[in-house]
Image (spheres, rainbow, N blue to C red):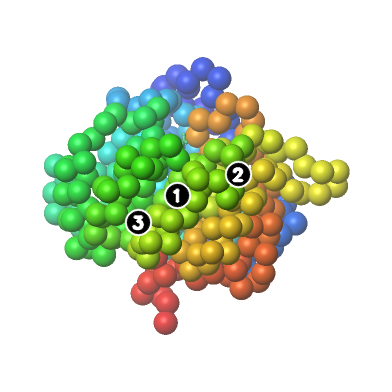
Amino acid sequence: MSKPTSGPFEKTPGWLDWYGNPSQPAFRVPAGSVDAHCHVFGPGDRFPYAPERKYTPCDAGKDELFALRDRLGFARNVIVQATCHGADNRALVDALRSSGGKARGVATVKRSVTDHELQELHDAGVRGVRFNFVKRLVDFTPKDELMEIAGRIAELGWHVVIYFEAVDLPELWDFFTRLPTTVVVDHMGRPDVRKPVKGPEFALFERFMAEHANVWSKVSCPERLSVAGPAALDGERQAYRDVMPFARRIVETFPDRVLWGTDWPHPNLKDHMPDDGLLVDFIPHIARTAELQRKLLVDNPMRLYWPEEVA
Ligand code: 0GY
């Protein structure tokens, strides 16, 4: 894998480069598995980072992503537009077009996007848009603008991916529940894993999913949510243990509405850069049967992103 740079841009001070030599996971993912949350960054000299970005990452291009896919045993990727590229989806589209049909995408668009541009994104493999409510990542976008976009992309059969912090769910609830599409929540709505899994905060998230059959969740990013960190018991590959009860609960309660992804190249981590092989070994601890693993890694992402291939 090539050495991370940012092309002509200066990386955010303290930025952690992605792990160039991930370990081989002990867990073998089922045939046809999809890494349903990952990004491409740049390379910045070809696909410049957006002026309004809140961070400048290291380059992490399609070739490195596809190499990681193969190394970890995945068959396909869902590439999610990262905020450092704003609504300029060129790096995403280039990766999708280069993937030979093995990648689909989630874009960021503005109200000014034309029908023609939406169709071009669709032809490249985009199947959703992401609405980001994490304040450290984006500037505010009015909700009427987002609702208008949601209405337009619904006509293409796309869905909306939402990213928010758990404390903001009550305020965003009404908006989320009015969205006319399938709604995919990033990283279980970022629970505070120091709080009990059966406490009011996570119970609200569970209720959000229970009461709305169009809501799905990614059970990804233990490295982002964990307080315990990657420390594993001697000889065991069980990192991020404090996140397991949360992810397991969502997988077991909503087995047909969960997705999993590496989140490579892991933007904005301050303390450590995860070994993607170790992240794959998180999966059997949250999806504890072969059936749950198949739903999480194959059936669900295929239904959402490659429905034409599902009988
Ligand atoms: C993630 C999480 C983060 C960043 C982004 O688009 C992004 O910049 O998604 C984050 O900083 O929490 O899902 O990659």
- What residue does disc 3 label? 183
- What secondary structure is marked by label 1? helix
Ligand 1 quadrant?
top left
Question: How many marks are shown on the rendered structure?
Answer: 3
Specify whether tag 3 is near ligand 1 (CB below 8 Å). Answer: no
Is residue 144 positioned above or below 152 on the image?
Answer: above
Is residue 129 visible in the rendered image? The answer is no
Question: Looking at the picture, how far across and down is residue 222, in whole percent?
Answer: 60, 44
The structure residue drawn at horizontal position 43% and vertical position 37%, both measured from the top left corner, is 167
Left or right placement of residue 57 versus residue 177 in this view: right
The structure residue drawn at horizontal position 26% and vertical position 47%, both measured from the top left corner, is 175
Residue 123 lies in what quarter of the image?
A: bottom left
- 44 or 81, nearer to the observer: 81
Residue 196's tag is 2
- What residue does disc 1 label? 204
Question: Looking at the picture, how far across and down is residue 224, in whole percent?
Answer: 56, 38
Which residue ends up furthest to the front in the rendered image? 200
Is residue 164 positioned above or below 291 on the image?
Answer: above
